[in-house]
Amino acid sequence: MEEGLKKEMKYIEFGAIFHLLKNGTPMIDFESLKESFEFLKFVNAPKKHWIDSSEWGMARAMHNVVLKQMKMVLQQNKFISISCDEITTLDNQSWILMHAYVVEKWRRQPILLNLERVVEGSTSNSFITIIICSLIDLGGLLVVDVVYKVVCFGADGVQIFKV
């Protein structure tokens, strides 16, 4: 098979995955899109690789691209603001949602940093550990970056500014 045709077929598959993720459709619906593409008579629609395990590889690849871009943005900006919110679900699980905010071209840009289940108990120490680890592991920041770049922290409507 020629290289251009393979590339076109991958674009179709990535487009299908993007459509599923954008619309919040479960990834298990990936395989069902094959029939839709065949019915619509897509030219060069892929005939292989329409299995429910292949879409997770593509989703992971997309996630890695987003993660790389997020790290680059956080590392390049001089100041970062963090906002957190704790959520308790109906089954008494505790989750923490974290956003990082940077200013680009005089506009405040939100970045979803992490959504993580709190396993060690909902204490301030466990939240601090999750927040710092998220900034270092997912944000690609060094400890010194966290100390000097984070200028504001907000949780449940309370803002704390570093002096």
Image (tube, helix red, strand yellow):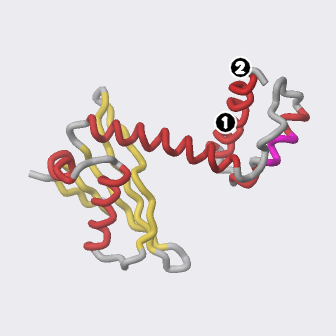
Tag on residue 4? 2
| Quadrant in the rendering for residue 3 | top right
Looking at the picture, does residue 3 appear above or below residue 20?
above
For the residues marked 1 and 2, what is the alpha-carbon distance in whole angstroms? 15 Å
Which quadrant is home to the N terminus?
top right
Tag on residue 138? none
Tag on residue 14? 1
Judged from the image, the secondary structure of the residue bearing numbered disc 1 is helix
Residue 52 image point, x, y percent: 74, 52
Residue at (41% x, 37% y) in the render: 69
| Quadrant in the rendering for residue 156 | bottom left
Report if residue 33 lies within the magenta region.
yes
Residue 60 image point, x, y percent: 57, 47
Q: Which residues are magenta?
A: 31-35
Q: Amino acid at mark 2?
A: Gly
Q: Along the horizontal axis of the image, is 109 left or right of 150?
A: right
Report if residue 133 lies within the magenta region.
no
Residue 82 image point, x, y percent: 29, 52
Seen from the viewer's position, the closer of residues 18 and 90 is 18
Residue at (21% x, 41% y) in the render: 79
Farthest-out residue, left: 163
